[in-house]
Amino acid sequence: MTGRVEGKVAFITGAARGQGRSHALTLAREGADIIAVDITKQIDSVPYALATPDDLAETVKQVEALGRRIVAAQADMRDYDALKQALDDGVAQLGRLDIVSANAGIFSYGTLAELPEQTWQDMIDTNLTGAWHAAKAAIPHLRAAGGGSMILTSSTMGLMAISNLGHYVAAKHGVVGLMRTLALELAPDFIRVNSIHPASVDTDMVHNAAMYALFAPDLPEDQRTRQTLAPRFQALEVLPIPWVEPADISNAVLFLASDEARYITGITLPVDAGATLK
Ligand SMILES: NC(=O)c1ccc[n+]([C@@H]2O[C@H](COP(=O)([O-])OP(=O)(O)OC[C@H]3O[C@@H](n4cnc5c(N)ncnc54)[C@H](O)[C@@H]3O)[C@@H](O)[C@H]2O)c1
């Protein structure tokens, strides 16, 4: 049986774990080879652990177990030259590029009145400038392939606002402007560009002590668990679930990457259990 992205090559940022790893496995299962990058070290303003080299190695192992090829590299979205080098190396080894999933991102929190300069800057540099870096580095390769699909990961917070996350909200809204302008500029080259907008996703970005403290400041630390937090996450959504799974986002990425979406460009696709209805 032919896969839905058979013979294509996908560049995925933040691929060491979470949604990025899920996107890599989903696209590989459907026939794509993968170029994977991740920072695999810490950013000081981020209040939970980012991925490790072991996480990235595990993504490599799992993609190879599916019989697909993968080229993985450590690269920081904030560093354009390093990111471009990693992508160029991957394309040199795998022969082409068709799909971009600009997925890497960080989370931190604070009111806009008090947010430290560095926390703001790290957020914008990673979640917004990083997405542009991925797109910019990919454009020549997609043009050489005669077209392609870029999927930029925004958030429900790219379509609405919430207190204490102003820098995240600003970066994720910025991703929408980036996506729309890329979609206009790249349409003549048959490069489609869309954004996806997840609600809470069951990954390490959500399940950590800092996020739990934000959602449940009233609970003693030892009572902040998945179970006690679930109703608070569920209150953000319409469907009666606390969070979606990484696979739910991967299915949207796969659709937008595939030829089934060949005339879809410039859209903001929520995968949010109805959160943006509120
Ligand atoms: N988890 C959620 O609830 C949620 C909701 C909406 C949107 N998102 C977005 O989804 C994307 C994926 O997040 P996730 O839920 O898989 O979280 P995650 O923390 O598990 O994965 C993010 C990955 O990005 C990597 N990364 C972070 N900064 C980087 C940098 N500067 N350069 C390269 N890699 C970097 C991390 O090491 C990590 O592996 C992010 O853009 C996030 O903002 C997440």
Image: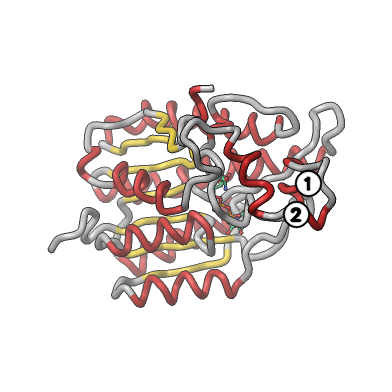
Residue at position x 63%, y 52% from top? 205
Image height of 33 relative to 196, above or below: below
Q: CA distance from mark 1 to mark 2?
A: 6 Å
Residue 30 image-quadrant placement = bottom left
Q: Is the N terminus in the top left, top right, bottom left or bottom right quadrant?
A: bottom left
Measured as percent of width and height from the top left, residue 40 is found at 63, 65
Left or right of 36, for residue 261: left
Residue type (three-letter) at the residue carrying disc 2 = Ala
Residue type (three-letter) at the residue carrying disc 1 = Ala
Image height of 240 relative to 42, above or below: above
Asked if residue 143 shows in the view, the reply is no
Q: Is the C terminus in the top left, top right, bottom left or bottom right quadrant?
A: top right
Q: Residue 249 versus residue 237: which sits nearer the camera? A: 237
Tell me the number on the disc at residue 213. 1
Measured as percent of width and height from the top left, residue 247 is found at 41, 53
Left or right of 194, for residue 96: left
Asked if residue 27 shows in the view, the reply is yes
What residue did someone put label 2 on? Answer: 209
Residue at position x 46%, y 30% from top? 274
Image height of 147 relative to 65, above or below: above
Residue 217 image-quadrant placement = top right
**Quick one: label 1, few (<14), some, or many (20+) residues within 10 Å?**
some
Q: Residue 104 versus residue 88: which sits nearer the camera? A: 104
**Quick one: label 2, few (<14), some, or many (20+) residues within 10 Å?**
some
Q: Residue 55 versus residue 191: which sits nearer the camera? A: 55
Labels 1 & 2 near each other (Cβ < 8 A): yes
Measured as percent of width and height from the top left, residue 37 is found at 51, 61
Left or right of 262, for residue 125: right
Extreme-top residue of the structure: 278
